[in-house]
Image (cartoon, rainbow, N blue to C red):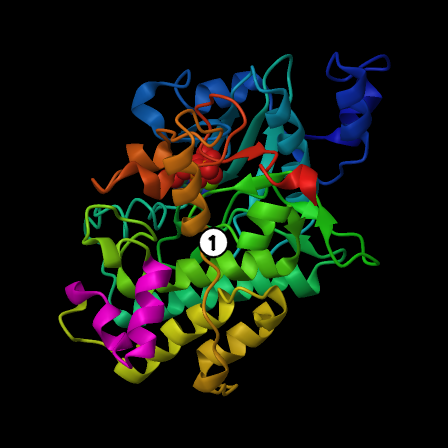
Amino acid sequence: MTCFPFLFGRRLDSATGDPELDDELSGVHNVHLYSYKELRIATDDFSPVNKIGEGGFGSVFKGKLRNGQMAAIKVLSSESRQGVREFLTEIQVISDIEHENLVKLYGCCVEGNHRILVYNYLENNSLAQTLLGGRHGNLEFGWRTRAKICIGVAKGLAYLHEEVRPHIVHRDIKASNILLDQDMTPKISDFGLAKLIPPNMTHVSTRVAGTIGYLAPEYAIKGQLTRRADVYSFGVLLIEIVSGRSNTNTRLPVDEQYILERTWKLFERKELVALVDTSLNGDFDAEQACRFLKIGLLCTQDSPKLRPSMSNVVRMLTGERAFDDRTITKPGLISDFMDLKIRNDPKPKMETNHTSSDYNSSGSNTLEHTTLTSEPSSHATTVFTPVYDRSI
Ligand SMILES: Nc1ncnc2c1ncn2[C@@H]1O[C@H](COP(=O)(O)OP(=O)(O)OP(=O)(O)O)[C@@H](O)[C@H]1O
Ligand SMILES: [Mg+2]
């Protein structure tokens, strides 16, 4: 394996054939560089048999590296220029950080037109495929496992938000980006959309990227990115894990379709326990489960300022920190905004995509997996300029 400084030492003119790319890569250290040949051998020439998923950036293959280690090999689709930038962002962001609840990057390949990321392989797939996608297999999603997953994801995000300098906003926290290892320890993946927040700024105004259903309203509508947008997405995910359902399911009766609306209504009626996954057959700690759902509501409040920081979320989840139910305000609902666009615009800019989540499909409606796009795309997560962007 090779590191970038060596790579640059080896080729005096250009490392990648693209001066812009060379420039960006020269700032990246401590990342192992794999040859395309090694990854081809590892995946049996990227055989469809070894394909384990497909997302916004391209296909993911399972492979065995030369040293015997199993790896998830994410091949970036070559036509996407945007994807290359995200690819580089991902390398820069994750090469330096390590945490029990974050996916480990082994290295990458940037040979010719190939852009490939190599991660540690996580045996138990993503929450989208397993818990929400109905492909449990032998996996047990009992209450204790769910609580461990929720707390683990919260810790990983608290680390990105509060311990890494400069702070990192993930921007795409969702069930398909939470992978599970052999012990059902959750690992947050996909830092491709992460943006480093300069320490002296409160938010980065940027084009919006993310996945409908998890997007904080202020981020989707105004493009204002703060850590509190991730807190919102985490809140949605938390409720999904406790309830065992996706955030949007148009097969359900109208007043149950959007998880946040449903959670709020049940909270107001003091019937939150009805939302807990029935597949647990009543075998759960009701006090803890309802606390988790209320924390989900705290995280998804309309006003970003009212949402707790992730370190406080960890303390609330573990019971170290109390909170007053009466302070919880109504969630911000992007679904209202979506409904409006879809109903009023026969050719909406926001397109429904068939994504990897459909590939993982639980058979529920595609709106669950809708992404915001500015042009037709097969990407699960993509970037668009929000409709109201210009007026703000
Ligand atoms: N490190 C890994 N170990 C095991 N499986 C993985 C790993 N990384 C990805 N996968 C599998 O590949 C699938 C596709 O991942 P990918 O991140 O490309 O897309 P996605 O998360 O579904 O969508 P998006 O592009 O919006 O993030 C995941 O859902 C997961 O099942
Ligand atoms: Mg992903």
Q: Is residue 41 above or below residue 309?
A: above
Residue type marked 1: Lys
Q: Is residue 87 above or below residue 253?
A: above
Q: Quadrant of the N terminus?
A: top right
Residue at 50% across, 34% down: 67
Counting every numbered tag in the picture gives: 1
Q: Is residue 89 magenta?
A: no
The answer to whether residue 31 is seen in the rendering is yes
Callout 1: SS = strand
Bounds of the magenta segment = 259-279
Viewer-closest of 25 and 311: 311
Residue 226, quarter of the rendered image: bottom right
**Which residue, given by chain and number where applicable, does mark 1 sit on?**
187
**Disc 1 CB within 8 Å of nearest ligand 1 atom:** yes
Question: At which x and y percent is residue 138?
Answer: 19, 52
Instruction: Determine the main secondary structure of the stretch shown in magenta.
Output: helix
Residue at 58% across, 66% down: 303
